[in-house]
Amino acid sequence: MFFALLMLLVIFGSVGLLTCLLIVGATRCPRLPAPAVWVGWQPRVGGSPPVGLWNVTHDIPGHPRHSTVSTTTLEALGYCVVEPQ
């Protein structure tokens, strides 16, 4: 367990590690935690539900570090994501 946490710290940094631990701890998700921090909700027109937005902390396929992506994008790439309520 210690080695896994150490590797997450090396890969994601301290903020990313905290995000990973919160996501994994909250959901027990078997997938890799998203290397991203929560930004907020983007409202949509026409009564559609808002879109959850995240800033990625490391390069992910198709999106360089510091990009803003949606929850749908992270989930489509196979990451575990939990939006705040």
Image (cartoon, rainbow, N blue to C red):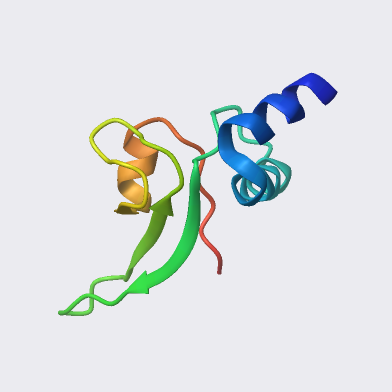
Q: In the picture shown, does residue 5 fall above or below 56? A: above
4 sits left or right of 57 in the view: right
Q: In the picture shown, does residue 53 fall above or below 59? A: below
Q: Nearer the viewer, residue 45 or 22?
A: 22
Q: Position of residue 7 (x, y in %)?
A: 68, 25
Q: Residue at x 23, y 35 (%)?
A: 62
Q: Quadrant of residue 70?
A: bottom left
Q: Residue at x 73, y 23 (%)?
A: 4
Q: Residue at x 31, y 52 (%)?
A: 67
Q: Is residue 1 visible?
A: no
63 sits left or right of 24 in the view: left
Q: Nearer the viewer, residue 27 or 77?
A: 77
Q: Position of residue 72 (x, y in %)?
A: 32, 48
Q: Residue at x 39, y 39 (%)?
A: 75
Q: Quadrant of residue 43?
A: bottom left
Q: Nearer the viewer, residue 28 or 68?
A: 68
Q: Position of residue 85 (x, y in %)?
A: 55, 69
Q: Quadrant of residue 8?
A: top right
Total numbered badges shown on the rendered structure: 0
21 sits left or right of 54 in the view: right
Residue positioned most to the left: 46
Q: Is residue 59 visible?
A: yes
Q: Position of residue 83 (x, y in %)?
A: 51, 59
Q: Quadrant of the N terminus?
A: top right
